[in-house]
Amino acid sequence: MSLTLALAAVLAVAAIAGWFGYSRAAAIRSSGTGRLHSLPAYHGFYVALWAAVPALLLLAAWAPVQTGLVEQAVLSSPEGQALPDFDLQRNAILSEAREIARGQREAGFNPESSALAPRYAEAEGRMATIGGLVALVLAIGAALLALRRVGVRFRARTGVERWIMALLFAASLIAILTTLGIVLSLMFESLRFFRLVPPAEFLFGTQWSPQIAIRADQVGSSGAFGWIPLLWGTIFIGAIIAMIVAIPLGLMSAIYLTQYAHPTVRAWMKPLLEILAGIPTVVYGYFAALTVAPAVRDFGLTIGVSNASSESALAAGLVMGIMIIPFVSSMSDDSIAAVPQAMRDGSLAMGATKSETIRKVVLPAALPGVVGGVLLAVSRAIGETMIVVMAAGLAANLTANPFDSVTTVTAQIVQLLTGDQEFDSAKTLAAFALGLALFVITLILNLIALSFVRRYREAYE
Amino acid sequence: MNARVKKRYAAERRFRVLGLIAVAVSALFLAFLLVTMAWKGLGGFVRAEAAVTIDFPRSDLIIDPAALRGPQAREVVAAAGLDGILARAAVDNYGPQAEQLFSAAGARSLGRQLIADPALVERRATVWLPVASRVEGAAKGRGDAASEQLVAQIEAQGALRKRFNSDFLTQSDATDPTAVGVWGALKGSFLTIIVTMLLAFPIGVLSAVYLEEFAARNRWTDAIEVSINNLAAVPSIIFGLLGLAVFLNFMHLPRSAPLVGGLTLALMTMPVIVIAGRNAIKAVPPSIRDAALGVGASKMQVVFHHVLPLALPGILTGTIIGMARALGETAPLLMIGMRAFIASPPNGFTDPATALPVQIFLWSDEVDRGFVEKTSAAIIVLLIFMLLMNGLAIYLRNRFERRW
């Protein structure tokens, strides 16, 4: 028996039990012995839920336990004990045996795996049978207990609604678990990295060349894992160049659209800006690499910068800035629109022109919201991957020249994890450390931005 | 005094013009981007074909027409050595410089034509076949001297034509840019989005319902709200790292399968749906809830029979926008391994697959100049899907959303 068969059996038991509950309740209703509290359908669902959910939870908890037990059983068999001691090879043979036993492949690269496969299949079958039988017993037992409660006075609808409430609660738990999962998995892998590379070297080092020795005597095996050049590249492209482009354009667009524009112009431009926000970043990246980067390089060469690279920070920063405009614009739009009309009217009554009102009254009043929007935009730009991977290159430079190529944290994460590296080496673990650093930075920025915006909204509501 | 007023009015005009310039720059950039992609990409939908006359009975081709009609037709054709026959026929037709006129893609197209019409094998026939990448480049104006000469020669004989490249939409990735298609990537994207939707929509909506209607207002639910707002703003690559660490290394799910991609993207899309759902549910006026309670409904019935149906248009709009964003994501899918070369479309949720944005990224790295127009053409396909989904969301919002 396999776990899928057990799953189907539990569901079948639940359906049958539900049907029994429904028909019993319907019989009570039609026989006229008393008025039911709930509709018969609720009785049926009550029984079905009690039959299905505990058994399904048991199966879900059994599945990972079973993997461990099966592996133990296989390793203690005679073929299992003959396996080499080397961790990596043994795991490779085990996973090949697992795939052969499940019919996912014909034969593995290692000869031992074909011998191991029947043991695997047998152990899996045995464990699955145990788990499946326990689940079935649980399902049938729970169904019988629930069926006994079906009666005239029984509040089935309340019972079902309690189940639904549990379901709702579980769904919201998943949202929290995701955050927890991100933090835990990043921290777990980063701790493994920090055991190989000291944190001080990572946080304060200014050399980034992630090489790892494959053999002990390999020349050029010393790796430097200092992330300062990456941090600088990220800030240079995302927080400096992109913001120089995005803040003026975004803010002025928002001002124009809220204060000066004709309603039809506003009705057309807002969707246009939404489209700008909806274009996939890989399109922006390709456009940057194809059109903007050569143009920037030519421009650099004409104004006399001799080593203008074709993968420059300026190209990536420009395109990223344009991508960020909708974010700045929409947050500023909301903040400016929320400033009370009384303040505007007062200023105009004093004789100020529209632009003076905006510059001296509306903008200072809307400033917290605008700053919050800018911080959110910076956090978005910092986390952007595809534009920098395609247009900004992979050379870790600490340079202030916008025509030079720099690399960012996200580009390095992609580079480190899409090579052919075994998972344990410091090179791939460095990607998780970088990811943790990125997560922390964007988290702090988001918290500050959201608290700004919330505090500001309270002031005017 | 007058002079000062005039200066202030001039400043007002300048300010207004600045605002207009800012809006115009954004609009112009969008137009520039779309026009550039269309300009470079429309060529990808057009394919150059050359006519070649092959005398099948006299050539070295040994194929039984009955085998072509049978179930093993594709294997028979693949083993028949059509490359050599095609090269010799090209040389016969156009001289020794035409030996490289057709590539493997041409041979595959010939094979498909033979399967479609097995009677061709028994006579001398003229077939139109796609030309090799270098020759196609020359036909579109960017080739080297030898290829341009060949193209001129063939064109003079009226044997070169340009046709809509239907293969682009029905074939998968290949090494030859004239033979690539986006169908494999499209299917992978569809499967991934289906998994994402099946997971993110129920969990997101149910979470929104719980958090908005039933959860008590205390420190824990505040923390939950803050954490969901943060999740919506986390960079997408972090979700890729999460998928790599949990789904691939801990749960040993198959690498680069739509199942894993869908799980990762579902985690990313779920906060967006929760936030949209909460806003939509918040917008339903309390009078509806009170009326339902007054008629005798239980709290759960109020929510599921009255509030949720009224909030559904807003939830759907948010969901479609979230799905459109997930469709365009590349970084998380790169992390979970969808960057391999996949030459045939996936058949199920656990087959290795690729997605359209990842396909665009992989093609952008290729050295062959023929890939530039294919990448741009794939971008056009992606943008069309984006536009459709966003347009659908805007239509739904305008048609069904009620302003209380």
Image (cartoon, rainbow, N blue to C red):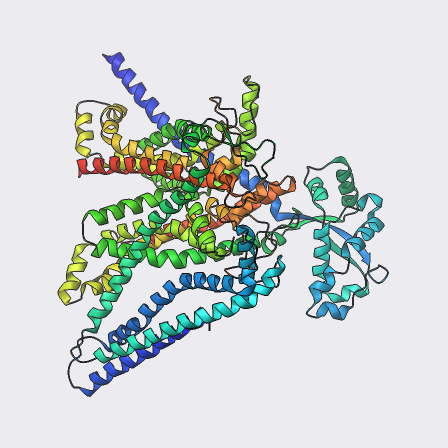
Q: Is residue A303 above or below residue A12?
A: above
Q: Residue, x 58% and y 37% (percent of image)?
A: A216
Tally of numbered discs:
0
Q: x%, y% of residue B332?
A: 46, 46
Q: x%, y% of residue A76?
A: 50, 63
Looking at the image, residue A231 sits to the left or right of residue A139; the answer is right
Taking depth in this image into account, of B185 and A295 the one nearest to the observer is: B185
Q: x%, y% of residue A46?
A: 26, 73
Looking at the image, residue B362 sits to the left or right of residue A385; the answer is right
Locate residue A107: give its quadrant: bottom right
Q: Is residue A410 above or below residue B19?
A: below
Q: Is residue B202 visible?
A: yes
Taking depth in this image into account, of A365 and A123 the one nearest to the observer is: A123
Query: Residue lying farthest bottom?
Result: A31
Q: Residue, x 21% and y 54% (percent of image)?
A: B215
Taking depth in this image into account, of B52 and A430 the one nearest to the observer is: A430
Locate residue A449: give its quadrant: top left
Q: x%, y% of residue A419?
A: 55, 42
